[in-house]
Image: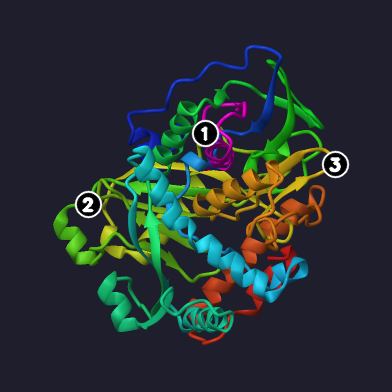
Amino acid sequence: MDVTTNGEVSFWYADMGGVPGYRQPLPGDISVDVCIVGAGFTGLWTAYYLKEAEPGLSIAIVEKEFAGFGASGRNGGWCSGEFGWSRQKYLSSGTRAGVIEFERQLRSTVDEVKRVTEAEGIDCDFRLTDCLTFAQTPAQMARLQEDYEAAMSWQVPTTRLELIGGAEAAARIRVPDAQGALVRHHVARVQPAKLVRGLAEAVERRGVAIYEQTTVTGIAKGRVTTNRGRVTAHRIIRATEGFTHGIPGNERQWLPMNSAIVVTEPLPDDLWREIGWEDHQLLADASHAYCYAQRTRGNRIAMGGRGVPYRFGSKTDTRGQTQPETIEKLKDILYRMLPQTRGLRLDHAWCGVLGVPRDWCATAGMDPQTGIGWAGGYVGLGVSTSNFSGQTLADLVLDRQTERTVLPWVNRRPRKWEVEPFRWLGVHGMYWLYHRADRNEAAGGGKTTSRLASWANRLTGR
């Protein structure tokens, strides 16, 4: 295993000087207006907008580890304002106009995150840029063309998306065998641990209490029970995303999908010129297995992908430590996308979990009978979507009818995941088919998507 550090939550914390110390745990039984379970992006943004709307609210956040321990402090740092998977799926809970409006509002989160970080003095390496999704085979290019045409048919503004050919794509970043790229404009790169820690400090300044080292053992109407005491609250928000399965009664709600990242040593200027990656664009590919990358503030490459996608029984990692097999897969992806990096040292590898609903569509909602709200299922697009969750949940907690509360993702409840071993077999079967499809497309030179990928999508409802 050729990597300097494995785990220790993530490189993003090493970049900040190390994993932070803990805040105090819940001191015993308390009563507040709102209790939020989980001190990641979703919970913190919710607290932020609640305090912005009603400064007098008493709010407590309870967190098993420390603020930003989960995906919020481990992700790839894409603030994309992206929609996720199929727009078509949201038609089951809304109209075409509602889906278009949802996407429009979600795109505005990039500017909203920028506004808050500037207003609160959060230095999170925020940088507006583009995202380039490269095609390295004719089949991948055909899929990008389909995605572009589908977006245009849904009235996504042409200023948001651009489809470019191979020569222009390679001129922006020298990815080999580039057939073209889909360019998403007006996205942002962030250092996610800096953002989540800065946001935690911002809500504390507004009087929100964050209790760490506090394990939630149950959520019911009007109360949250923990190993440190009970929190009584009129409104409760479950903001646990990929860790939702750990709360009794939610074991099959959202599947904890693994994603992992490796970070290189800093690249010298001449290597950046050789790669052509001059403008800090976000980088992805159009393979079925998928990868994502950014050029960090410190001139490193952070390259992420799925690796081993799911652990049996919804088990999660130990403080970000990932398998040697995953590290090797990510090295292969890095060298396939950027062969110029061969020979670079890998300074850090880690993993985390993201929440995947059975229909692969994000949701936010509030049960009016119990007063319990939730948000998550971001499927890897949580940096920006969690901001919109916070805005939406604040409206729902305060019983406000707004342009957000009528969108088709609100109160969406997909069916639960299957029991084991069927969900393990389903997820691993899906990614086995994806990898085979990618190999077949690369070897065959065909212009159409492999049928194996279509079978994989049908298998898990993606």
Q: Nearer the viewer, residue 439 or 66?
A: 66
Residue under label 1: 69
Indicate whether 310 appears above or below 33.
Answer: below
- Identify the disc placed on residue 267: 2
Q: Look at label 1 and name its amino acid.
A: Phe
Q: Look at label 2 and name its amino acid.
A: Leu
* Whole-number angstrom distance, CA of label 3 to CA of label 2: 55 Å
Tell me where residue 293 sits by quadrant.
bottom left
* Whole-number angstrom distance, CA of label 1 to CA of label 3: 31 Å
Task: Say what secondary structure mark 1 lies in.
Answer: loop
> Where residue 65 sits: x, y (%)?
56, 26
Residue under label 3: 369
Residue plotted at (72% across, 61% down): 359
Task: Say what secondary structure mark 2 lies in.
Answer: loop
Going from the N terminus, do you reach mark 3 or mark 2 first? Answer: 2
Q: Which residues are magenta?
A: 42-71
**In the shown orientation, is residue 454 left or right of residue 322?**
right
**In the shown orientation, is residue 274 left or right of residue 291?**
left
Task: Say what secondary structure mark 3 lies in.
Answer: loop
Q: Image quadrant for the N terminus?
A: top left
Going from the N terminus, do you reach mark 1 or mark 3 first? Answer: 1
Label 3 Cα neighbours within 10 Å, binned few <14 / some 14-19 / many ≥20: few
* Whole-number angstrom distance, CA of label 1 to CA of label 2: 28 Å
Indicate whether 389 appears above or below 28.
Answer: below
> Where residue 63 sits: x, y (%)?
60, 28
Residue plotted at (47% across, 61% down): 291
